[in-house]
Amino acid sequence: MNLSGKKVSVIGAGKSGIAAAELLRRAGAEVLLSDHGRIEEHEMLRLQGLKIAVEHEGHSERVCDADFCVISPGISPQVQVVKTLESKGIPILSEIEIAALFCKARIVGITGTDGKTTTSTLIHHICEADGHQQGYRSYSVGNIGVPFSSKAQDMNPGDVAVVELSSYQLERCYAFRPDVAVITNITPDHLSRYEGDMRRYAAAKFRIYANQCAGDTLIYNEDDALLSEHFRGGHFPFNIVPFGLEPLHGGASDCRIVALEGETIVVRTASGEEQVMVISAFLKNSFRGRHNISNVLAAIAAAMALGISYEVVRSVLREFKGVEHRQEFIMTVNGADWVNDSKATNINAMRQALEAVQGSCVLIAGGRDKGNDYTSIAGLVRKKVSFLIAIGESKAKITSAFEGIVPVKEALSLEDAVSLASGAAVEGETVLFSPGCASFDMFENFEDRGIKFKQCVYHLQPC
């Protein structure tokens, strides 16, 4: 695509913004990269060396001198620069939208409230293994941490782009069309962005399939009540493949993927039923829980849509050890297992982690609250948690929610929480770090939070 002579403003100089700016400049556009915060001098000089105009510590009127604008996903639609661009009728696009225009590879898009990183990682590993045999490459990009724009021009026809997608990234997508789309689930999250309206949040997620047509595939979790109601009985121009842990009935598809009686994964089609794999073959200490069976079902469905053999799928699943910061087993100290689930930034993710714990646990939770309703997991906490340690901005709210249900203590810091947990955990228990909240009160992001938690655990000395 040649954008010679086009003027483009890129709002936000994070990883995705910089990647989009560089991609657009290579395509011939005149690019202005504008950020409300500060850009380091060495980075400004590098970008200017690429003939990308840069401004920081505020947005000037120059951003409106553009044919279109690309916006970073973390920028709220309510900020003034966005409202100004909209008032002037300047098109605002997602970085994902731009990258897809340059992408020649097959695209697998994965979205959902929970499970999208694990599912994306699984699909990427499966495609990598198949690609080694078939002669193509797989790229893991998007919300997983590598901007789609940074890799789009490297991809060839026949390659696969496995793109993890947040609702924020999908909001400004208008022509984006994945060959295969996966929706893992939709539960309350980020509702402050959507003014507390689940319908608006779901609508952003549903943009993943808005442009799909005949020959494309949409894969969804039939166990999710919202998704089941949305897709059941509907008429869509693309292939629909539901998956679930419960028996699947009705629907718009003659292919479905289920975990049969919790023991075996089965693909059912109009022509019959085929067993794919016994579940116990891939559930391991760092990769366990019913939610991970759902993630596996979604990955199998995507592999089927791409024409990948069950042999390749089985081989990858046997070796898969899970995703860092997602129910990640760290070590055993004094007979207690320590698990890092820093990626749990909402209540549903915390619920999944608690359900996966075998026996009782000491729970460390808290951070920047996202309007959490802790009463929804009160019964599970009573059943699974022997002692709860609250951290971060939400610690008073967590203490109030669970006092009288389990013993609760507030920690002054993450280090203090780990020390308290070490003293409280008994042999055979699990210490579960599953915050259920955003990380930005104390950390740069959930990865930073998880790394610091693991460092604290590594400093514990078995006695």
Image (tube, rainbow, N blue to C red):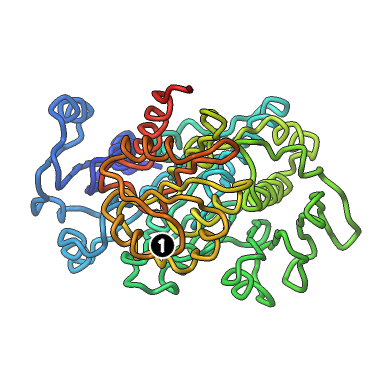
Mark 1 neighbour class, 10 Å CA radius: few under 14, some 14 to 19, many 20 or more: some
Residue 332 horizontal side relative to residue 55, left or right: right
Q: Give residue 56's position: percent from left, percent from top.
A: 12, 41
Residue at point 28% right, 40% down?
413
Residue 371 horizontal side relative to residue 294, left or right: left
User: Tag 1: residue type?
Assistant: Phe
Residue at point 53% right, 46% down?
361
Residue closer to the observer: 303 or 172 = 303
50 is higher (above) or lower (below) than 256: above
Residue closer to the observer: 400 or 328 = 400
Q: Give residue 113's position: percent from left, percent from top.
A: 49, 57
User: Which picture quadrant has residue 182?
Assistant: bottom right
Circle 1 — which element?
Answer: helix
The residue furthest right is 272
Which residue in the protein does label 1 denote? 402
Q: Give residue 42's position: percent from left, percent from top.
A: 16, 24
Residue at point 49% right, 65% down?
378
User: Which picture quadrant has residue 278?
Assistant: top right
Q: Which quarter of the image is occupied by the N terminus?
A: top left
Residue 221 horizontal side relative to residue 209, left or right: right
Residue closer to the observer: 437 or 51 = 437
Residue 153 horizontal side relative to residue 360, left or right: left
Q: Is residue 27 visible?
A: no
Q: Give residue 135's position: percent from left, percent from top.
A: 67, 26
